[in-house]
Amino acid sequence: MPTNLIVRDVEEEIVQSLKEQAARNGRSVAAEHRAILKAALLQPKKRSFNEVLASMPNVGLDSDFAPRRG
């Protein structure tokens, strides 16, 4: 169920930028604020370099990928 969120003490330049971005996107300031929060908080977790490497399949030996000479 949706709930209300109040953000206090936001700098005027941030508020102005939010208003301008909302206008560019054809949304209300509240809708733009929700879209920014959703994009920032609900995106998939970024994997570390080690996690990416660990997920790669074992497709051969190092020698299989050595440059060919001659």
Image (cartoon, rainbow, N blue to C red):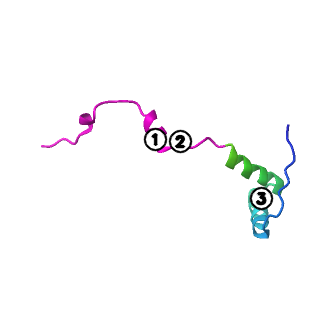
Q: How many marks?
A: 3
Q: Which residue is mark 1?
A: 50
For mark 1, does the 10 Å Cα neighbourhood hold few (<14), some (14 to 19), or many (20 or more) residues? few
Indicate whether residue 64 is drawn in magenta. yes
Q: How many angstroms separate mark 1 from mark 2 (CA)?
A: 8 Å
For mark 2, does the 10 Å Cα neighbourhood hold few (<14), some (14 to 19), or many (20 or more) residues? few
Instruction: Where is residue 8? Give x, y as percent.
Output: 84, 60
Which amino acid does the dot numbered 2 rest on? Arg
Which amino acid does the dot numbered 3 rest on? Ala
Which residue is pictured at 48% across the width and 38% down the height? 51
The tag earlier along the polypeptide, 3 or 2, is 3
Horizontal relation, residue 1 to residue 25: left or right: right
> Which of the 4 image quadrants contains residue 70?
top left
For the residues bearing labels 1 and 2, Cβ distance under 8 angstroms: no
Q: Which residue is mark 2?
A: 47
Instruction: Where is residue 63? Give x, y as percent.
Output: 23, 35
> Which of the 4 image quadrants contains residue 16?
bottom right
Which residue is pictured at 47% across the width and 44% down the height? 49
Task: Specify the segment rendered in magenta.
Answer: 43-70
Q: How many angstroms separate mark 1 from mark 3 (CA)?
A: 38 Å
Q: Where 66 falls versus 16 (above or below)?
A: above
